[in-house]
Image (cartoon, rainbow, N blue to C red):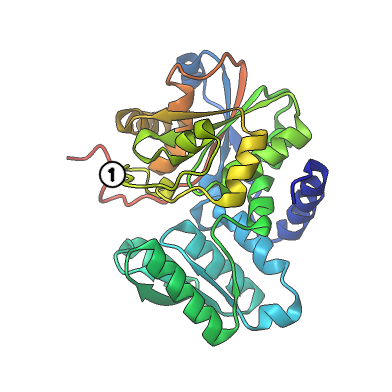
Amino acid sequence: MSDLMSWAAAIRDAHLRIAPYIHRTPVLTNTHLDSRAGASLFFKCENFQKVGAFKARGAFNAVMSLDTVSAAAGVVTHSSGNHAAALALAARMRGIAAHIVMPSNSPTLKKQAVAGYGGRIVFCEPTLDARERTAEAVRAETGATFIHPYDDNAIIAGQATAAVELLEEVKGLDTVVCPVGGGGLLAGSALATKWLQPGARVIAAEPAGADDAWRSFHARTLIPQSGAKTIADGLLTSLGKRNFAIMQDHVDAVLTVSEAEIVSAMKMVWQYMKIVVEPSAAVALAAVLSAKLPDADRIGIILSGGNVDLDHLPWQA
């Protein structure tokens, strides 16, 4: 699906479909951060979303759009992060099984979240190949529908609804900035923005230590992630194929930021906005404050999530 109007219809349908199940998260502002950026900033707070991250949007759209026969067999995915919890919750709300393949070294908090939402966890070795092979084995055994964490049309359309709400609430944005890992949120945000506010720029923000999107964007070919190292653990994965194609067509720039810039931005959000965000969410603000952003007056920033281990904050020794 490449035509923007076809995507617009899918996003509109997704927004109606998931409305009963998700939070319409607030858009917040902060005068101190405005002065730091030299622009008016509007923060779409997906840290207040179900499961604490935007991932609930895509998961609910994917699960609730399954036909009855497919849904009866359940769903399966591989994820060590927020998608795992989101899919488990969405499946529980529909009353179907969720089989979640997780690397054996997944954070305890993530495993507890998935189990708490009723997901059946299947552990595997901490490699992408092991995750994919294990998920395929579970799919073959159970007949469950595989739902990719980001390289999936229903997921992309669901994630797009965060930007839809932002653009509905705040008129006249000239720039929308969001973090990029696998690219579900970025692809959805780009499609929604170019549909609803065609003149606005879409900027992807990425850690310099996990810069496959930046490299792929400039090479105009998909370059897999390798040797990624960043505190923004939600952005470690490689960019998806269809996500990359959408990025090439609808994203205006990809900016990278240092670990120090991520930590600084995260601390600012905690200190001045009085809300909890995870490092991956802070990457977008870090890009805005980096002086690399083209001139902008009204900037929408998607704070992607707020799931952080309070016993291991990045500014603690």
Q: Is residue 30 visible?
A: yes
Q: Is residue 275 visible?
A: no
Horizontal side of 174 relative to 278 (left or right) equals right
Q: Which residue is mark 1?
A: 313
Horizontal side of 227 relative to 249 (left or right) equals left
Count of numbered badges drawn on the protein: 1
Q: In the rendered image, which quarter contains the C terminus?
A: top left
Please name whichever residue, 194 or 52, is drawn nearer the observer in this view of the structure: 194
The residue carrying pointer 1 sits among few (fewer than 14), some (14 to 19) or many (20 or more) residues within 10 Å by Cα, namely few
Name the residue furthest bottom.
141
> Would you place residue 80 above or below residue 39 in this image?
below
Please name whichever residue, 148 or 278, is drawn nearer the observer in this view of the structure: 148
Please name whichever residue, 202 or 281, is drawn nearer the observer in this view of the structure: 202
> Would you place residue 231 above or below residue 196 in this image?
below
Q: Residue 231 at what x, y percent from top left? A: 32, 43
Please name whichever residue, 137 or 114, is drawn nearer the observer in this view of the structure: 137
Q: Residue 308 at what x, y percent from top left? A: 37, 49
Q: Residue 20 at what x, y percent from top left? A: 72, 60
Give the structural element (helix, strand or loop) at label 1.
loop
> Would you place residue 34 above or below residue 146 in this image?
above
Q: Residue 132 at what x, y percent from top left? A: 46, 68
Horizontal side of 267 relative to 305 (left or right) equals left
Kind of residue at disc 1: Leu
> Would you place residue 77 above or below residue 13 in this image?
below
Name the residue furthest left.
317
Q: Residue at x 71, y 58 (%)?
A: 18
